[in-house]
């Protein structure tokens, strides 16, 4: 089997290279986001493909895995053994009666897929026998249903792919999803305790049988579609799907596949690592494969230590191969030879110890001769026994170690070629799995994240792949819906919170913001209008001092008006409870107070200038200090103008319309949190930006307005508008300029001030040139 699987994989690799597939860089197995009908993310680094398997399909996979595990429990725990019942109760699945252990394959229909699976599994999987596979693949058994499911599943996905012009690798996506589901369902086996079989061996045995069944059923389905001349068959798809199906993908502990020589490659971990030094080019670079294999064989034959290890591996594998040929033909319950081989078959170490003992080899050879005498008329079976007898005869007079010490002829080292083929087949599978495992990571199974209603909603909206063998489409046509977004936030929330503290602010927001607005919104949340813009609205989120509502624009506009009434109602109540001065009066007081302080600063500056003319000492320092006072005064003036404008409750409102936001629910993580609903949409962000108000713009307007009042000597002048959209400019000074500015202030020297002014002027000019450019 090892040689057969190695040849099969290398032949597949050769065909990939002939078809100019980029094996080295894994392009064949790498998903291209732009080819997918739906995905999250535009690049491979951002990629996420949301999917779920049909519930019936998941049940088929789960039952196949649990049934196989239950059969192993029956085989290794025994019907009355301690621990058997707890294991079966945990599995809670019915399996057919399990017959006595046998390696016979004539219990399967000739040339059937069942017999092919059994033959491959017996030659490549430890702890497996024909009765285990027969019980799993029995009529109406869960293994048989699994085979049928694979055939129907891939036929449907291939047809779906060709229906959409083959631009998207739908069948490959389905394969990735199916393997993910198999691995997920195999996690349940971790809780199963079988007395005679540790978890690592359960994972290896069950995983390899599932792999073999999956691969053979997929091959049969592709061959059938090809023979039928189906339009959904393509050679490119056959290469992609078959190459993507490798043993390690089906194991929870992938490294276990090389734990013994009994595997599809015929080599173990130690041999693989030792051969890596002689492999030549780096793994994954398989160009000129024939040259690589021949060169590796030559280098290995010159490595005496590795040759000894390969011979031991070869003898171990040869014993199994010849013993299996005997066991598939003879089913003799009372045979000492059969019982001995059963004890040896699964463990490399036990076989090596056996072959190193000439007496044990001679004893087994004698037992075989006794069987041959009893069935002397059965010529065919006698012929099947001869290779094993001849092999044992080699070790009946000397141990395996003695055979190793005997020099080998150069032309008798075919086992080196077989080992090298196994090595490159394994290296190829590692290369495939490296990329396929990465792609499986981009597949996002929503069944564990969404409840049933959300999955139905996402699927119907065309945002969720559904892989199943039923008649429903894999992916519905994506519908891009549009809706309005209303963003409302309370202005100056941070400043108010700092003044009145969190507890008082929370109560204030509840009474005057949250409850009135939610009450107003509730009137528009039920029912749907005739057109999309008239549909009801829903609350998307309340992020602190704001609220986001989504839905029909008509209802959102009505809600915006209601919110304005809520704000006016609050102001009216505030005036009745605590009459306060109007905004104009507050601003007028601010202007008057600061005008008096400005006049005082002007008086002081004039006095200091007179002192400077008289050359009085210390005047420059006093002027610098006065300049700092004037700077602080202007900043304070602007702040108080802003504060006067913010005395009342004020809400910003903005409505946008466009693509509907994406909503997701993050399920709770233990006791840490409850379900969290998150909505992400460009129009939500746009609405939020629309409510932003720059206080510096208003302060600038107030200063301009006050100047106009003074020039016209008319304190009654008002704004001719309700809304003003303006820009604010700022000069960003480099750190070294800022330090120089501080030095000018501290020294107070006019020469430094002039140099500083020139430097700032140059920086400002450079910025202006960039803007013009």
Image (cartoon, rainbow, N blue to C red):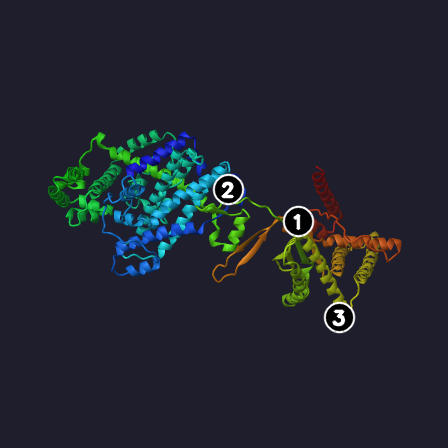
Give me the C-alpha separation between circle 3 and circle 2. Answer: 61 Å
* Residue 577 marker: 3
User: Does residue 70 appear to the left or right of 479 in the view shown?
Assistant: left
Residue in the foreground of this view, choosing between 475 and 652: 475
Give me the C-alpha separation between circle 1 and circle 2. Answer: 31 Å
Q: Residue 262, percent across and down? A: 27, 44
Which callout, 1 or 2, points to the residue nearer the camera? 1
Q: Which residue is mark 1?
A: 657
Which callout, 1 or 3, points to the residue nearer the camera? 1
User: Does residue 600 appear to the left or right of 678 in the view shown?
Assistant: right
Give me the C-alpha separation between circle 1 and circle 3. Answer: 40 Å
The residue under the point 25% across, 38% down is: 310
User: Does residue 415 appear to the left or right of 92 in the view shown?
Assistant: left
The residue under the point 25% across, 57% down is: 78
* Residue 44 marker: 2
Discs 1, 3 touching: Cβ within 8 Å = no
Q: Which type of secondary structure does the marked residue at label 3 adopt? A: helix
User: To which quarter of the image does residue 286 belong?
Assistant: top left
Q: Which type of secondary structure does the marked residue at label 1 adopt? A: strand
């Amino acid at each position: 089997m090892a040689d057969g699987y190695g040849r099969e994989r290398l032949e597949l690799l050769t065909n990939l290279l002939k078809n100019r597939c980029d094996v080295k860089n894994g392009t064949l197995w790498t998903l291209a986001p732009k080819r997918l009908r739906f995905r999250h993310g535009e690049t491979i680094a951002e990629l996420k493909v949301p999917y779920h398997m049909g519930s019936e399909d998941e049940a088929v996979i789960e039952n196949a895995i649990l049934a196989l595990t239950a059969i192993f429990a029956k085989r290794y725990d025994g019907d009355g053994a301690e621990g058997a019942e707890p294991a079966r109760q945990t599995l809670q699945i019915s399996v057919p009666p399990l017959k006595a252990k046998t390696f016979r394959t004539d219990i399967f229909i000739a040339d059937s897929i069942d017999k092919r699976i059994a033959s491959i599994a017996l030659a490549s999987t430890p702890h497996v026998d024909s009765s285990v596979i027969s019980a799993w693949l029995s009529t109406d058994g869960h293994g048989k249903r699994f085979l049928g499911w694979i055939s129907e599943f891939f036929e449907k996905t291939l047809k779906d792919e060709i229906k959409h012009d083959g631009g998207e690798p739908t069948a490959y996506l389905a394969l990735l999803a199916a393997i993910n589901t198999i691995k997920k369902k195999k996690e349940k086996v971790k809780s199963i305790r079988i007395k005679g079989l540790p978890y690592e061996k359960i994972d290896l045995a069950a995983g390899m049988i599932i792999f073999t069944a999956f691969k053979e059923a997929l091959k049969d389905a592709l061959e059938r579609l090809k023979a039928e001349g189906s339009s959904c068959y393509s050679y490119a798809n056959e290469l992609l799907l078959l190459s993507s199906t490798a043993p390690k993908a089906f194991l929870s502990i992938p490294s276990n596949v090389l734990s013994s020589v009994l595997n599809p490659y015929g080599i173990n971990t130690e041999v693989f690592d030792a051969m890596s030094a002689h492999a030549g080019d780096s793994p994954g670079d398989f160009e000129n494969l024939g040259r690589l294999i021949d060169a590796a064989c030559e280098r290995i034959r010159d490595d005496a230590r590795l040759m000894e290890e390969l011979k031991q591996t070869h003898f171990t594998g040869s014993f199994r191969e010849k013993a299996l040929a005997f066991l598939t033909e003879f089913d003799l319950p009372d045979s000492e030879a059969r019982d001995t081989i059963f004890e040896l078959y699964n463990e490399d170490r036990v076989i090596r110890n056996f072959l190193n003992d000439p007496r044990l080899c001679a004893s087994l050879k004698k037992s075989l001769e006794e069987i041959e005498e009893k069935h002397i008329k059965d010529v065919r079976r006698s012929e099947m026994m001869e290779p094993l007898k001849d092999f044992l005869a080699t070790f009946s007079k000397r141990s395996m170690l003695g055979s190793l010490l005997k020099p080998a002829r150069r032309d008798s080292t075919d086992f080196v070629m077989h080992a090298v083929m196994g090595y490159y087949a394994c290296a190829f599978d590692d290369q495939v799995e490296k990329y396929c495992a990465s792609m499986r990571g981009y597949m996002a199974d929503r069944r564990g994240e969404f409840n049933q209603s959300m999955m139905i909603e996402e699927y119907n909206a065309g945002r969720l792949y559904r892989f199943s063998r039923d008649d429903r489409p894999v992916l519905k046509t994506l519908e891009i819906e549009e809706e309005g977004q209303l963003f409302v936030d309370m202005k100056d929330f941070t400043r108010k919170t700092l003044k009145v503290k969190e507890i008082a602010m929370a109560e204030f927001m509840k009474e005057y913001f949250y409850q009135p607005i939610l009450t107003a919104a509730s009137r528009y949340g039920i029912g749907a209008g005739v057109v999309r813009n008239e549909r009801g609205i829903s609350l998307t989120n309340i992020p602190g001092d704001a609220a986001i509502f989504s839905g029909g624009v008509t209802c959102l506009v009505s809600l915006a008006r209601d919110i304005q009434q809520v704000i006016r109602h609050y102001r009216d109540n505030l005036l009745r409870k605590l009459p306060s001065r109007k905004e104009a009066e507050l601003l007028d007081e601010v202007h008057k107070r600061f005008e008096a302080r400005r006049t005082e600063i002007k008086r002081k500056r004039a006095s200091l200038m007179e002192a400077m003319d008289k050359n009085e000492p210390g005047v420059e320092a006093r002027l610098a200090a006065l300049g700092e006072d004037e700077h602080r005064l202007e900043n304070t003036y602007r702040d108080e103008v802003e504060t006067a404008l913010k005395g009342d409750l004020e809400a910003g409102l903005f409505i946008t319309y466009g693509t509907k936001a994406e909503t997701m629910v993050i399920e709770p993580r233990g006791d840490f949190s409850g379900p969290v609903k998150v909505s992400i949409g460009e129009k939500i962000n746009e609405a939020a930006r629309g409510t932003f108000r720059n206080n510096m713009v208003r302060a600038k307007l107030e200063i301009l307005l006050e100047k106009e009042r003074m020039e016209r000597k008319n304190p009654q002048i008002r704004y001719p508008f309700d809304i003003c959209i303006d820009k604010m400019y700022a000069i960003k000074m480099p750190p070294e300029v800022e330090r120089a500015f501080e030095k000018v202030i501290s020294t107070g020297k006019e020469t430094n001030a002039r140099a500083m002014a020139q430097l700032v002027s140059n920086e400002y000019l450079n910025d202006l040139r960039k803007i013009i450019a």
